[in-house]
Image (cartoon, rainbow, N blue to C red):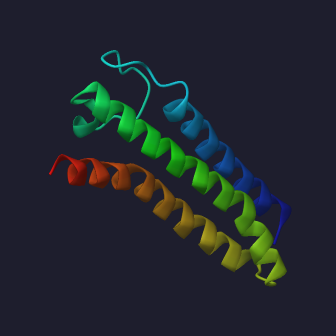
Amino acid sequence: MSEILLVIYHILALIFAAAGIVVLRSRSSYPDMKAGYHVKEAMKSKETWEYANGFCGKLCMVFTVVFLLAPRFLISAGAGNAAGTAVLIIGGALAAAVTVLLPLRMLRRREK
């Protein structure tokens, strides 16, 4: 796998880490809500705001670790640039979708 692909994996991990830190530690207090996980359901109350941001932040941190470890597994498996790029694109899209949609799903389930 090329060095540029490794750099891209690390940049993606850094983006998820920064997002995770913001929603876990640096989010705005309710009802200000300038920074954090913004969906209508999360902004209903202080409890939902805290829960959704905590959940989303933890997911971001999990994906940070995934994107730091994935290239090592790919290299040890002998994967080339094509496989590394495919995992990066598909994995990045899935991680972004899961990070946005799963906390929303958990909030809706919790409200029932």
Q: Position of residue 76 (x, y in %)?
A: 83, 79
Q: Position of residue 42 (x, y in %)?
A: 28, 36
Q: Is residue 79 left or right of residue 28?
A: right
Q: Is residue 13 above or below residue 75?
A: above
Number of numbered discs overlaid on the protein picture: 0
Q: Residue at x 60, y 48 (%)?
A: 61
Dividing the picture into quadrants, the one containing residue 14 is top right
Q: Is residue 5 left or right of residue 46?
A: right
Q: Residue at x 24, y 49 (%)?
A: 110
Dividing the picture into quadrants, the one containing residue 46 is top left
Placement of the N terminus among the 4 image quadrants: bottom right
Q: Is residue 19 left or right of residue 4?
A: left
Q: Residue at x 55, y 28 (%)?
A: 25
Q: Is residue 31 above or below residue 14?
A: above
Of 20 and 14, the residue lying toward us? 20
Of 38 and 87, the residue lying toward us? 38
Q: Residue at x 85, y 61 (%)?
A: 3
As drawn, the residue found furthest toward the top would be 32
As drawn, the residue found furthest toward the bottom would be 78
Of 41 and 48, the residue lying toward us? 48
Q: Is residue 87 above or below residue 18?
A: below
Q: Position of residue 112 (x, y in %)?
A: 14, 51
As drawn, the residue found furthest toward the left would be 112
Q: Position of residue 111 (x, y in %)?
A: 18, 46
Q: Is residue 70 above or below residue 100?
A: below
